Amino acid sequence: MLFYSIFFEYHSVMNSRNFRFDINDLQRLMDVSDGLASKYRLQILLLLSKRSRSIQEILKEIDISPSTLSFHLKVLKEAKLIKYVSNPSSRGNEKNVSLNVDTIHINFMQDVTGNSQNIHETIPIGSFANFDITAPCLIVSDKGIINPIDNSIVFKSYQRINASLISFEKGTLEYNLIYNELIGSKVEAISFSQEICSECPDYNNTWKSTITFWINDIEIGSYLSLGDFGGRKGNFTPDWWPIKSSNYGVMVKVSVNNKGTFINGKMVSGVKISDLKLNDNPIIKYKLGVKENSQYVGGLNLFGKKFGDYDQDISVSITYKK
């Protein structure tokens, strides 16, 4: 990730919500620019950044006619900035409008050396390598709860790989990534995106939790979750899951570059990419959790595919040069 770049944060990798393209990707740049070139379309994107909404909900929030809204939604869909998803709680064929982008990144620098490379992968939330969790805790697949409930032994079960939702009050999960190609390379940026929220009994939309992140055992920053979100179905939450439980979260992107560490675009610490020494060892350890001495020990819900508002697990993106 070159820092002569402009960050709208987005990525043209198939099945990724992080779109990235160079200045020579003219057609994609024109499509996305058209999508952003309207006050009303930007208002729509701002609404959808909080949660998906029905057409009627958007009309209530933005003072435009249904036909004008239809036009703006068409432009946004053609730019791949939004998508339509089923609304399980509605009757008939009504669908919700959902954000289809987390970040847009436009690289304005031509790579004359030709050796700038990117890694983009998805980490299943159940593929953690280590954990330090105490009850209460829970692992759920899209088919049902994985037993035992409120017993950390479930984190040792082979069935954990099927996890679509992981919940715990405090502790940490650690994921190991192995990239031999990074040895001796210059790593310029790394980011992890995941859908998370606080965790409490049932749900509480104002239940706060301080969620912390580490890379290679270095604490890089924390995110204040403002609630354990329920009361409506997540866009991909199974029908059998209670609506009075945690149903969806917020997409949180943690990024480290040569300027520092950022969460959803806001700088949260001075830890830089060089501090992580990612070119010394092929193993990258990524950890997230809730510390016992956090300001708000309010638990963590980690959503994966087939659960929550976003049909994805943990997304990782790395930019490096040989």
Image: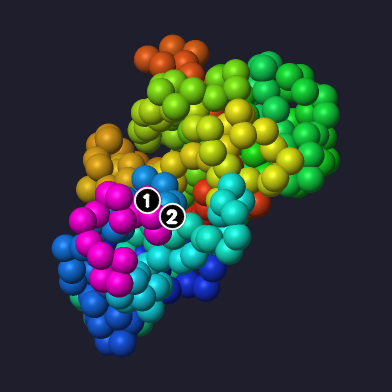
Circles 2 and 1: CB atoms closer than 8 Å: yes
In the image, the segment drawn in magenta is 55-68
Left or right position of 197 against 67:
right
The dot on residue 54 is: 2
Residue 1's quadrant in the figure? bottom left
Left or right position of 241 against 3:
right
Q: Residue furthest top?
A: 293
**Residue beneath the point at 54% across and 24% down:** 203
**Image height of 255 relative to 97, above or below:** above
Q: Position of residue 317 (x, y in %)?
A: 45, 59
Whether residue 182 is visible, yes or no, is: no
Callout 2, which amino acid?
A: Ser
**Image height of 6 relative to 278, above or below:** below
Front residue of this view, candidates 171 and 220: 171
Q: Is residue 60 magenta?
A: yes
Q: CA distance from mark 2 to mark 1?
A: 5 Å
**Residue beneath the point at 53% across and 32% down:** 231
* Secondary structure mainly formed by the magenta segment: helix
Residue 76's quadrant in the figure? bottom left
Front residue of this view, candidates 63 and 199: 63
Callout 1, which amino acid?
A: Glu
Task: Provide the residue designation for mark 1.
Answer: 57
The dot on residue 112 is: none
Q: Is residue 217 magenta?
A: no
Left or right position of 45 against 129:
left
Whether residue 201 is visible, yes or no, is: yes
- Which quarter of the rendering shows the C terminus? bottom left
Asked which secondary structure carries label 2, the reply is: loop
**Residue beneath the point at 76% across and 19% down:** 151
